[in-house]
Amino acid sequence: MELLLQFLTNTGYYLADFRNVIMIVVGCVFVYLAIAKEYEPLLLLPIGFGVLIGNVPFFKGFGLGIYESNSVLHYLYFGVTSGLYPSIVFLGLGAMTDFSSLLANPKLMLLGAAAQMGIFFTLLSALALGFLPKEAASIAIIGGADGPTSIFLTAKLAPHLIGPIAIAAYSYMALIPIIQPPIMHLLTTKAERCIHMRETRVPTQKELLLFPVVGMLLCCFLAPASIPLLGPFFFGNIMKVSGVVERLAQTARTAIIDTATIFLGLTVGASTQGDVFLTGKSVGIFFLGAVAFSIATASGVLFAKFMNLFLKDKINPLLGAAGVSAVPGSAREVHTVGLKADPTNYLLMHAMACNSSGVIGSAICAGILWSFMLA
């Protein structure tokens, strides 16, 4: 009987408290949204299941938890805390990105820059709420709607906040179909949503080859701290457009990025142990993350309307919402909203141009914040 009682006290059922139960419910919701609603399943499914794994109670010191230095999960988590997984994800993103639309219509790059306003507004808001400067910078990058960039910067500045910041960033990316359309409808008229974008020229192969080289040099000279993200990103792109290393490009945009995404999502989810994750700061981060993402979307739309005051060929303001770097979710949502206004209005390729510039913009902002906070 004594052995039986000892066994029972070692089980997770006995060790669990309300915080574990809350996080398990959250994990189940993520898994449900990924499978039933197909909200960014490549992100939400690994994260949701990781939340379940991370909230199974256990005795400390057994080498089981993600925060125990001798555990398997801790070794896998090193890819998050070191910034390794985000860099690999950016390599794969570069190998998947087509800059043709951006090169054909360079002014759309401005929308990607405008959408980064959410980052700097949230930085000031977080400081006003009492967060430390490094914590505020990590929270602010959620406004870029770029999960890997958020994780990378947080790992460098405020590693104790990786869990809540990563969950907030990926949650809002997955909820794009819920968050962005109301903002787009509120800030645009039916006539504006029906604006057709003019057919653009086809960039030459020389332009496609020069862009990743010139882009990397310009961006990384501006913000050297963005090298770990933009270096692999532009390298992946030149592998794609060169045509001479198709095997490497194919591997980067499939096996490599998929492997990194699996371990990134699973370990970030597992880092949300109830006793570590459920704090007042986590609630504040979720609130600020929603504000940041909303402001980023609104900033892009409003800047597109501002540009139209000076342009002969008008831009569909919906494209501004794709200036956030949630690839390709925000571009897809812009296209969907445009089609509802006018079934003949195809905005996807133009939205992808804004989306890809948003990826570059958020990485530059992360590099600038990192360098400022460590200066």
Image (tube, grey):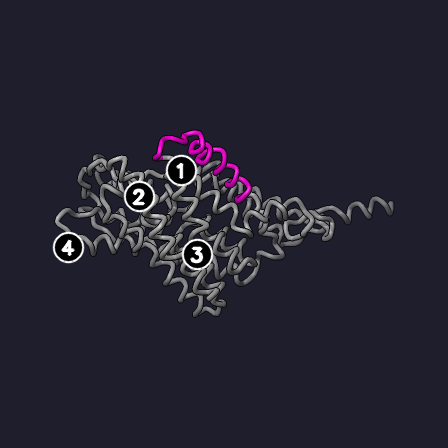
In this view, the residue in front, 79 or 29, is 79
In this view, the residue in front, 157 or 335, is 157
Identify the residue at horizontal 82%, vertical 48% (top origin). Answer: 6
Name the amino acid type tagged 1. Answer: Ala
Q: Is residue 7 above or below residue 282?
A: above
Q: Is residue 299 above or below residue 192?
A: below
Q: Is residue 247 left or right of residue 322?
A: right
Q: Nearer the viewer, mark 4 or mark 1?
A: 1
Does the rendering let one see residue 180? Answer: no
Q: Earlier in the sequence, mark 3 or mark 4?
A: 3
Q: Nearer the viewer, mark 3 or mark 4?
A: 3
Q: Bounds of the magenta span?
A: 241-265
Picture coordinates of residue 111, whole percent (x, y): 28, 51
In this view, the residue in front, 22 or 208, is 208
Q: Is residue 159 above or below residue 98?
A: below
Identify the residue at horizontal 34%, vertical 44% (top origin). Answer: 213
